[in-house]
Amino acid sequence: MKRKSLFTGTFDPFSIGHDAIVKRALHISDELIIAIGINPEKKTLFPLEERLDNIRKIYKSFNNIYVTSYQMLTIDFARQSGVDFIIKGIRNIVDFEYEKSMSDMNRRISGIDTVFLLSDPQYASISSSLIREFIMFNKDISNLIPIIQ
């Protein structure tokens, strides 16, 4: 039986921390859907299609990673996608508190569990918002994002 998981986020931009979570998720899941949640209220730096394209390029050699987007509740998308569990990366206690509440509610309404993967220590301080700020001030971010081939 194949295990299918879902890793969601805005991924604006997709960081080396996200990449580390994806690679670890593949150890516990046979298939992984990386999905960008569309929230019209959230202002993003990069257009949706560019974010999708970049992530697809990063994982183009993986036949068990699928990249898409959705505009509904994450738990509804998870159910629709037939996943066994949702993957969440946790950098700190603030992430944990937020994600635990969301996980509890998602499991309650759908039965789908969330698997928390703690960030590798060297990536714990990396956030997409920090990377966006560096971009706005013309700082080099090449060591903060995966190499896109």
Image (spheres, helix red, strand yellow):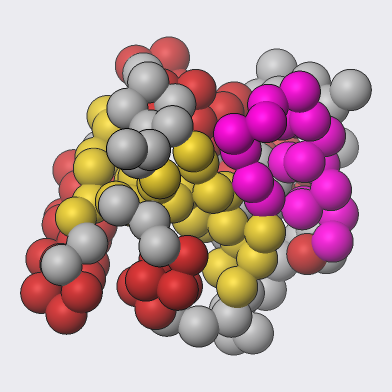
Q: Quadrant of residue 75?
A: bottom left
Q: Which residue in the rendered view is the most extreme toward the front?
A: 1
User: Which quadrant of the figure contains the N terminus?
Assistant: top left
User: Which quadrant of the figure contains the C terminus?
Assistant: top right
Residue 93 pos. (x, y %): 18, 43
Viewer-nearest residue: 99 or 45: 99
Q: Residue at x 67, y 73 (%)?
A: 43
Q: Residue at x 67, y 50 (%)?
A: 67
Instruction: Tell whether 39 sits left or right of 49.
Output: left
Q: Is residue 67 above or below residue 78?
A: above
> How many numbered discs, if any?
0
Residue 139 pos. (x, y %): 80, 31
Instruction: Tell whether 1 sits left or right of 61.
Output: left
Q: Residue at x 64, y 85 (%)?
A: 40
In the rendered image, residue 60 lying in the magenta stretch gets the answer yes
Viewer-nearest residue: 94 or 77: 77
Q: Is residue 117 above or below residue 70?
A: above
Observer able to see residue 15: no
Q: Is residue 61 above or below residue 131?
A: above
Observer able to see residue 47: yes
Magenta residues (range): 49-67
Q: Residue at x 47, y 65 (%)?
A: 81
Q: Quadrant of residue 21?
A: top left
In the rendered image, residue 11 lying in the magenta stretch gets the answer no
Residue 105 pos. (x, y %): 15, 73
Residue 147 pos. (x, y %): 79, 21
Q: Is residue 33 above or below residue 37?
A: above
Instruction: Tell whether 92 sits left or right of 137.
Output: left
